[in-house]
Amino acid sequence: MKIIVCIKQVPNTTEIKIDPVTNTLKRDGVPSIINPDDKTAIEAALRLKETNGATVTVISMGPPQAEKALREALAMGADEAFLITDRAFGGSDTLATSTIIAGAIEKLGADLVLCGRQAIDGDTAQVGPQIAEHLGIPQITYAADLSCEGNCIRVKRQFEDRYQILEADMPCLVTVLATMEKPRYMNVWDIVAQDEKEIGKITFADLTLDPARIGLNGSPTKVKSTATKQFDKTIETLELDPAEAAKTIVAALQKRHLL
Amino acid sequence: MTDYKTILFEQMLKDFAENEVKPLAQEIDEEERFPAETVAKMAKLGLFGIIIPRQYGGAGAGYREYIFAVEEISKHCGTTGVVLSAHTSLCAAPILEFGTEEQKQKYLPDLATGRKLGGFGLTEPNAGTDAGNQQTTAVELEDCYLLNGSKIFITNGGEAATYVVIAVTGKGPKGPEMSAFIVEKGWEGFTFGKHEKKMGIRGSATCELIFENVRVPKENLLGKRGEGFKIAMKTLDGGRIGIAAQALGIAEGALDTTVAYVKSRKQFGRPLSAFQNTQFQLADMATKTAAARALVYIAADAKQNKLPTLSVNAAQAKLFASETAMEVTTKAVQLHGGYGYTREYPVERMMRDAKITEIYEGTSEVQRMVISGALLKK
C-alpha cells in the first residue's frame, strides 16, 4: 500500500504575539510547526505501515522553509518526502492549492491519501476534500479512527454528538482529526537517517497544470480585508458575596447577549 | 546549509522532556521510585543508543547529541538524567571502546535499543576516591574467571542487565593488577544487596552488587588482562562529561523555574523581578550556567574527537558545572523564599539533586587533582 500524507507548515499559534502598534500577528521569530491535524495524519499513516505494511510519502506545498516540516515527518519514520514549490504557485487559494497538490499526487501515485481535517492558520477544511474531487476518488472526512482490511479503508467519522462507520475502497482520501491519535515523537535513529535523505522537489515544470488554474490567476477567492480582533480591556472589579456576584455576572452576560 | 539533524534532535528532546519527564519528576522523588515507564519511552526513541554506531543497532550520532539529551532531561529530572548517563558513559562506551567485535555484537544491540540497561561497578566500601584499593577479585581458572567481592553505590544497580565490573586479577609491578569484565544479571552467584536511601536523585537505583563465586567466561574479559585501571579511568573521563551535563541541566532547570517564579510572585506591591537584588542574582546564575555549558560542550567535543586534553576538559567541565549547579539551585531556593523550602516547588529537589554531582564519578577534589596534576606534570 502506498500512502501519501499531505501536510502544511503553520505558525505555532500558542506562541503567537500581537504587535501592539500595528495590531497584526508578529510572525518574526514565531516557530513553525506541522499543523496538528496533519501531524496526526502522519501518525495514522505510520500505524498503518506497522499493522498492514505500507510506504509513507509525505508532501507539502509551501516555501523552501517547509523543508523542516517534511524532515520532521521523516524523523518520525516516514519513508520519503517531497516539497511542492514554485513561484508560479504563489498566491494560490484553496482551490488552486488543491489543484496543484492533486497534480503532484497523480504524478507520485497513491492508494491512500491522508490529510489533516483543517489547518490552524486558515481553518477552511477545504483542501483535503477538493483534492479528492480533483482526483475523482472517494473521500471520508473527520476521521476519529482508521483501519485497513485488504483494499478497504474503514473510518469512524466523528460528529459533535454521534459517529458513522464508513468504508471506502482504495484509492481514497481521508481527512483526520488531531484527536485520533497522539502523534509519536521523532526518534534518534530516524533523526540521524533523515540527514542522508534528499527532499524531492516538485515544481510547475514537473506537473501538467493549466497556468490559468493555479497561483493568483487560478484563485477565485479574493480576500477583501482582514482585521484583528479588538479586545475591550476595561476591567471592572466588584467585591460581592457569592450569591450577589452570581446575579451580577448573569446580568452582565445577558446584557451582552451572551446568555 | 541548515543543520536539520541538530534542530530536530533538540526539538524532540525538549518536547519529550517537557511532556514525559517533567510531569513525573516530583512523584519519583517522593516515592523513591525508579522511573521505569520513562525509561521504556526513552528506549523507544533510541535515546539509549545515541552514540552507538548503526551496525550495532544504535543511531550513530555523536557525543554532543548524547550530552544534550542528558542536559535536557536533567532540566526537569536529575534522576532520569543519570539513568541515561550511567548507561551510556559507563557501560555502552567502554564496551564500544575496549570490546572485541564479538563482545560488541553480543552486548551493544540490546544496550542501544534499551532492551537492557547498563551499569558500572568500580566503587567499593574501601575504594572510593582511592579507586586503586580494590578488594573484589577475579581469579583465572581454566575456563573462566571466578569473581568474588562487592561493589557499592552502583547507579542503575539491579535495574541494569549488563555491567562493566573492575576486579583484581593478580599482582602487578606497582600494586594490584586490575582487569575489566562484562557481567550479566542473572548469572549464578551475582546478587543485589542494599538499596541506598539518598538525599537527592532519589528515583535513581543505587544498589550494592554482590559476587559470590560468579563464573565469568573468559571471553567476557574487557580489554586485556591488567588494563582494568586504565579502562576505569578512561571510562570515568567520559562519565564525568555525562555528570557535568546532568549538573548543567539541573542548573538550567532551576534558573528557568526561578525566572518564572520571580515574575509572578509579588511582595511590597511589586513582582520580585522588579527588585535589583533579584535581577543581579539571576544575572550571576545565568552567566555561570552559560560558562558551564561552554565547558561541557568543549569536553563533549574532546571526547568525540579523542583529543589528548579530554581528561582535563572533562574534569573542568564536571568541577565547574557541578559547583554551578549547587550554587544556582541554592540561590533558586533563596529567591523562592519559604515556598522554595517546601516540596510544593521543584527547586528544593533540584538543590538536593545538585549535591551529588559534586561527589559521584570523582568528587570536586578529585577533579582539582586531575586538573592540577596535568598542569604540574609539564
Image: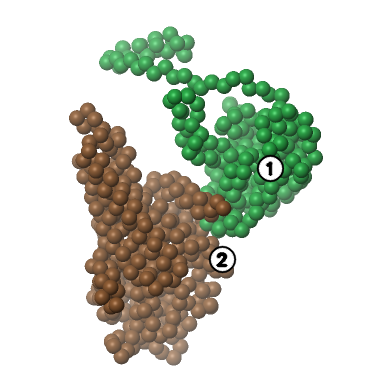
Chain colours: A green, B brown
Q: Position of residue B330 (x, y in %)?
A: 23, 50
**Can you say whether A18 is above or below B78 in the image?**
above
Picture quadrant where residue B310 is located:
bottom left
How far across and down, in percent of the image, does residue B213 sit?
A: 36, 81
Q: Which residue is mark 2?
A: B54
Spot occupied by residue A205 in the image (x, y as percentages of width and height): 76, 43
**Image coordinates for residue A217, horizontal then vertical, percent:** 73, 28
Label 2: element kind: helix
User: Which is more foreground, mark 2 or mark 1?
Assistant: 1
In which quarter of the view is residue A124 placed? top right
Q: Mark 1 highlights which residue?
A: A84
Tell me the residue at 41%/63% (across/down).
B300
Looking at the rendered structure, the kind of residue marked 2 is: Arg
Vertical position of residue B61 compared to residue A109: above or below: below
Other-residue count near label 2 (Cα within 10 Å), few / some / many at <14 / 14–19 / ≥20:
some
Q: Which kind of residue does numbered mark 1 sit on? A: Ile
Q: Nearer the viewer, residue B253 or B345?
A: B253
Of residue A120 and residue B374, the one placed in the foreground of this image is B374
User: Which chain hosts label 1?
Assistant: A
Residue plotted at (57% across, 21% down): A226
Tell me if I can see residue A154 in this picture.
no
